[in-house]
Image (cartoon, rainbow, N blue to C red):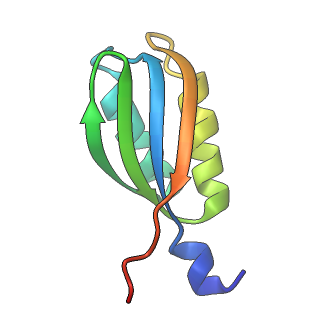
Amino acid sequence: MSEQNRYSWREHMTILGDVEAASFLPWIERHAAKLGLAQALCVAGPDRIELDITGPAELIDMMEMGCSLGPIDVWVEAIRRAPIESESG
């Protein structure tokens, strides 16, 4: 994988479960910032959060793991990920 592709990976992440806690969105923002990932919130509801994440694939993997484990006041049942195709053309 080239250095440029490694750092320009983009994915759409859908977090499903009991994710309504007010603390979860700020937690996601802080966790992404700590990992050096860019993130943009798309949808936030009591049973789903959808966001676009940009950064190294390995760090997006770490973001998924972090979201699945914490914080304690949410219950994540599943996380779905899909690559976002580049808009070049």
Check the image and name the residue furthest to the front.
89
Q: Looking at the image, which is closer to me, 16 or 25?
A: 16
Q: Quadrant of the N terminus?
A: bottom right
User: In the rendered view, would you say 21 is above or below 31?
Assistant: above
Write the residue at 36% across / 31% down: 49
Percent x, y for residue 8? 50, 74
Q: Is residue 35 left or right of residue 2?
A: left
Q: Is residue 12 left or right of residue 68?
A: left
Check the image and name the residue furthest to the right.
1
Write the residue at 37% across / 38% down: 50
For the image shown, how many numbered marks are present on the structure?
A: 0
Q: Is residue 57 left or right of residue 44?
A: right
User: In the rendered view, would you say 61 is above or below 7?
Assistant: above
Percent x, y for residue 41? 29, 44
Write the residue at 64% across / 36% down: 65
Q: Quadrant of the C terminus?
A: bottom left
Write the residue at 61% across / 55% down: 59
